[in-house]
Image: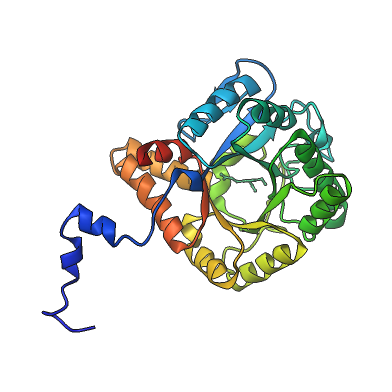
Amino acid sequence: MPAFPVSRPRRLRRTEALRRLVRETRLAPDQLVLPLFVRSGHGVRQNVESMPGVAQTSVDELLRDAERAAKAQVGGVLLFGIPDAKDAIGSSAWDEQGPVQQAVRALKRALPELVVITDVCMCEYTDHGHCGVLRDGTVDNDATLELLAREALSHAQAGADVVAPSDMMDGRVRAIRRELDTQGCPDTAILSYAAKYASVFYGPFRDAAESTPREGDRRGYQMDPANAEEAIREVQLDIDEGADMVMVKPAGPYLDVIARVKRTFNAPLAAYQVSGEFAMIHSAAQRGWLDLDRAMMESLLAIRRAGADMIITYFAVDAAERLR
Ligand code: PBG
């Protein structure tokens, strides 16, 4: 590169047209996935206080939100269920008449083109709020696998395009792949939450999904925020077990992990801009300390620039509508 004054990087920043021409990263609506929280009932819309614009809804209301997302060309939706009843093993997770299963069937009927992804985890369904079954106060990895496989199969049989295990049990991708393949759902894809950190930024979500552990925390199964090399091992394991797509979560505070995973693997990579990242931007904007729209777009662009192919974000519809 010639030195100044021959080199003047500002030449290519002079007009918006020039900036557009040399822009390296783009954000498109179909790279965004909208999380939705579904519960039983009719006409139900319960706003989540710490997440402006986010609500727990019944299936009929969920269809309206999904329609708006589809119209904005959002790439897909990710469903979380809030069951009527919880027990020690989370048995409502594979109830054919559960809120997620009903929502999947309704979505596939009303909006067959929209990609439907379901979150597979036990924490919304267990009365203790942990992501698997407990034995002597800790989550029993191997006993949980069978339950996760059962839950994933029931989502697949309802018509989900993709199942997304978020529990962080070892071996769950293999267990789910095997169950889907032997039970007639070989075409259902798996998006694994491969590098999911034990993060404080899930706080608002746990209000939304009513999944806060009654005792203890998730550090015995989710990853230590200090570790990046371990993320590579986790992603490798999940790809070897049959994951079609992998995820890093949270997104904004873990851009280095996203970049490393992208550099190391060629599987489609998702990043989850989680509830706390969303709530931080909103609360600063509410005080007039940040411009909401610009903070939203910059945060999403940064996640793409780091290497994420798709972004799961509560901003999906707002961002998509701005991009059109
Ligand atoms: C379920 C799950 C969580 C999130 C997604 N799936 C919560 C957790 O692990 O505690 C977090 C999503 C968010 O914060 O937006 N295991």
Left or right, 175 with reference to 130? right
Instruction: Tell me what residue is drawn at x 64 percent, y 56 percent.
Output: 245
Q: Position of residue 135 (x, y in %)?
A: 87, 51
Instruction: Tell me what residue is drawn at x 42 percent, y 45 percent.
Output: 280
The C terminus appears in which quarter of the rendering?
Answer: top left
Q: Residue furthest left?
A: 5
Q: Quadrant of residue 12?
A: bottom left
- In this rendering, does residue 297 appear at all? yes
Q: Position of residue 214 (x, y in %)?
A: 71, 41
In this view, 77 is above or below 221:
above
> For this rendering, which residue is in front, 57 or 75?
75
Q: Position of residue 15 (x, y in %)?
A: 17, 55
**Scheme by which the image is coloured:** rainbow
> For this rendering, which residue is in front, 313 or 253?
313
Q: Quadrant of residue 153?
A: top right
- In this rendering, does residue 144 appear at all? no
Q: Residue furthest top?
A: 43
Q: Quadrant of residue 5?
A: bottom left
In this view, 14 is above or below 146:
below
The N terminus appears in which quarter of the rendering?
Answer: bottom left
Instruction: Tell me what residue is drawn at x 33 percent, y 41 percent.
Output: 293
Count of numbered labels shown in the rendering: 0
Q: Position of residue 4 (x, y in %)?
A: 14, 80
Left or right, 6 with reference to 131? left
> For this rendering, which residue is in front, 281 or 315?
315
Left or right, 167 with reference to 204? right
> For this rendering, which residue is in front, 36 or 3?
3
In this view, 200 is above or below 158:
below
